[in-house]
Amino acid sequence: METLKIEIGKVSDHLYSLMTQTKARKIRAGFIKKDGSYREGTFDLKDRKTWKQTDGTMYQRKGKKRTTNPDEYILAHDLTKKQPRNISVSRLKWFSVGKKVYQIDRLELDNDVNVVFFNPVKFNHLDSLMEYYRKLNNTGENNDKSS
C-alpha cells in the first residue's frame, strides 16, 4: 500500500514550488493549448523586462500589469521561440525539472473541489511519456517548432 502526501491549497503554488525546488533553470512541459492541440517545449520562469527575439531585435515590455490570473496560468518564457507564454495550470499534462519528471492527473469532484495528482515518473520514461501525449492528441511530430 502506497501512502500519499495530501496538500490543501492552490495547485499553482504547489506546482511553482515543485518547479523551483532544484537549481535547474530550465523546465520542460507538455500541455494542451486553447485550440486543443498538444504542445511541448523548453521554458524558464525568469521574469524578463527585455529579451532578444528570434529575428535578432530586442523586445521590451510595455510596463503594463499582467492580464492573466497567476492562480490559473504559469508565466514562462519559451526558450525556443524567445517569447513569453502563459501555460494553463488546468491543461498542463506533465513537466520536467532537473532529473525529476511529473505526470499530472486530475479528478474534478465538483466546481469547488479538484483533486490533482503529481505522479513522479522515472526520468528515462520521459520520451515515452512525450510520445504518449503526441499520439493521444494525434500529432506525430514534436510541436515545439510549430506555432
Image (cartoon, rainbow, N blue to C red):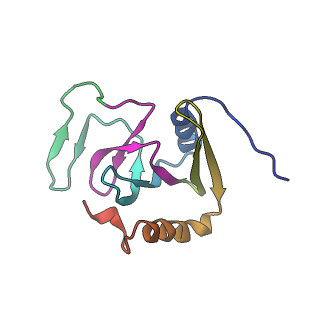
Q: Residue at x 48, y 71 (%)?
A: 131
- In the picture as drawn, the residue positioned furthest to the front comes out as 110
Task: Please state the horizontal and vertical placement of residue 21, each as a whole percent of the image.
Answer: 59, 41
Q: Is residue 101 magenta?
A: no
Residue 146 location, quadrant: bottom left
Q: Residue at x 46, y 54 (%)?
A: 29
Q: Nearer the viewer, residue 34 or 61?
A: 34
Q: Is residue 137 left or right of residue 5?
A: left
Is 131 located above or below residue 77 in the figure?
A: below
Task: Please state the horizontal and vertical placement of residue 85, each as a whole percent of the image.
Answer: 32, 45
Quadrant, the C terminus: bottom left
Task: Please state the horizontal and vertical placement of residue 120, each as a whole percent of the image.
Answer: 65, 55
Task: Please state the horizontal and vertical placement of residue 114, each as a whole percent of the image.
Answer: 58, 37
Number of disc labels = 0
Q: Residue at x 33, y 32 (%)?
A: 68
Is 114 located above or below residue 1 in the figure?
A: above
Q: Is residue 87 magenta?
A: yes
Q: Is residue 72 left or right of residue 109?
A: left
- In the picture as drawn, the residue positioned furthest to the bottom comes out as 140
Residue 54 location, quadrant: bottom left
Q: Nearer the viewer, residue 145 or 135?
A: 135
Residue 100 location, quadrant: bottom right
Q: Residue at x 45, y 71 (%)?
A: 135
User: Which segment did they paint magenta?
Assistant: 68-94
